[in-house]
Amino acid sequence: MAPIISEDNVEGVDEATLGGTGRGGILSDGYLREAPLRSYLHEGERPVMVRSNGKKGVLRSEVGVDGTERIAPGEGYRAFALATDARLLIVVGDTDDGDRSIAVSLADVEVVEHSDGVLAGEFVVTTAADVEWYFPSRSGLGPMVEYLDAASLSWIAIEERLDDARTAIAEADRLTRSRWYDDALSAVRDALAETDAARRSERELCAGGVTAAAERIERVEARIDETRRSVLEGRAAREIDRAEAQWREGEYERAHDAYGRAHDDYEEALGTADDGTVAEGLRTKLDRVERNVAALERAPVASAEEARGQADETDDLRERGDRLDFALDRYRTALELDWGRSTRRFEGDTAAIRDAVDAVARDLVETRRRYATRRVRAGDGHREEGRTAQAAACYRDAHDALGETAQTARELVPEALDALTAHRDAVEDRLRRLDTSDDQTPIPSGSH
């Protein structure tokens, strides 16, 4: 369908009518008194067609209300009805109050009618506020009425789409406050669909665009961008919280994925930021995410090496074993990360990590065996002194330490498994032979 406004289907308005001022004479028509018709146009507003009359001016009435008001031009001046791409402008020259203008937005036009008389016709515009404007003219009114009717429908479609977009924006804001970010983004997409439809209606009105419509659409699009940015920032912050929690739990791949989603959201938000301060703030957040990701990619090996170093620094065999166990878990995690991926995300030389796994596993097995030996020796001492309950506690410590290490020995230090198992069995035998009912531990006075 051809646009409503084009070179082929509108009359245009001549320069004399747009720019003329002054009283007419016997052989010439007058214009406006104070300023030319052009001065009533907004910047970028396109005049489409004009009709005029020299005596009757315009009549105003309200639906369902008695009484009318006629605004007539002064002697030698005229009244003009100028249809533009956004409004119907009625300007009456030299009234009792000087030149008088009435502007009716095409979006407010509900009904356009006209009638033909012997010497002149008349068109009537009824607005959404139930105001009727009657304008007579001797020029043909058919094209004017057809244009106003079609253009007003386009404008109404534009405004309805923008109203729907605003409703979707409000819903997105509500969902964002409730932290339903995915649903909020869906509402943002709905708003964008409405502004796209408004753009299509604008192009149906005029292929080259309508300044007033474009400005209204752009204002709503700016609100959409702001809302979309808010949603994306909120979702990114939530993903960062998840990433940090997963990092603390040693779930490095899930943490990496969460940081990646946060990074994507910040980048998308940055694409909507025209304001330099807003863009700078988003770039700062992006940089922070990238620093965190870099630290995360070093974390598995770094945390393993830190725990290994702490194990070397302590003389407490139980603590040393726990540190080595943690280091071994992190080294093994580092080996498993990025398994099957064509490109690695996490740092660490695979061969060096394997060597570390072997060394730490052997150290862990040996440390736990030494710890178990000490606990058994302590248990034997308690048993000989009749403190069977304390002896049992020592034996259980030894048994637990050896039992917890058996799987590590089986997988990584198989040559030590038989000795470790025999050690554990010997401790079990001590526990079985221990009679805790004959405990001779002194009972502190006052405990009865």
Image (spheres, rainbow, N blue to C red):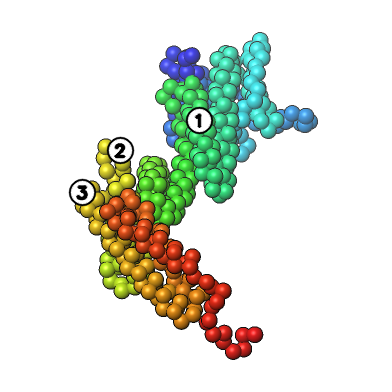
Quick one: 167 or 350, which is closer to the camera? 350
Q: Is residue 4 visible?
A: yes
The CA distance from mark 2 to mark 3 is 16 Å
Hey, what amino acid is under mark 2? Gly
Q: Dot 3 lies on which element?
A: helix
Q: Residue furthest bottom?
A: 445
Mark 1, residue position: 193
Hey, what amino acid is under mark 1? Ala
Q: Earlier in the sequence, mark 2 or mark 1?
A: 1
As drawn, is 380 to the left or to the right of 103? left
The CA distance from mark 3 to mark 1 is 54 Å
Q: Earlier in the sequence, mark 2 or mark 3?
A: 2
Total numbered badges shown on the rendered structure: 3
Q: Are marks 3 and 1 in contact (CB under 8 Å)?
A: no
Q: Is residue 42 visible?
A: no
As drawn, is 165 to the left or to the right of 123? left
Q: Is residue 79 above or below residue 177?
A: above
Q: Earlier in the sequence, mark 3 or mark 1?
A: 1
Mark 3, residue position: 351
Numbered circle sitting on residue 246: none
Report x, y in % for residue 299: 31, 55
Residue at (49, 70) in percent of width and height: 434
Q: Quadrant of residue 54?
A: top right
The CA distance from mark 2 to mark 1 is 41 Å
Residue at (65, 12) in percent of width and height: 116
Mark 2, residue position: 340
Report x, y in % for residue 30: 52, 26
Q: Quadrant of residue 187?
A: top right
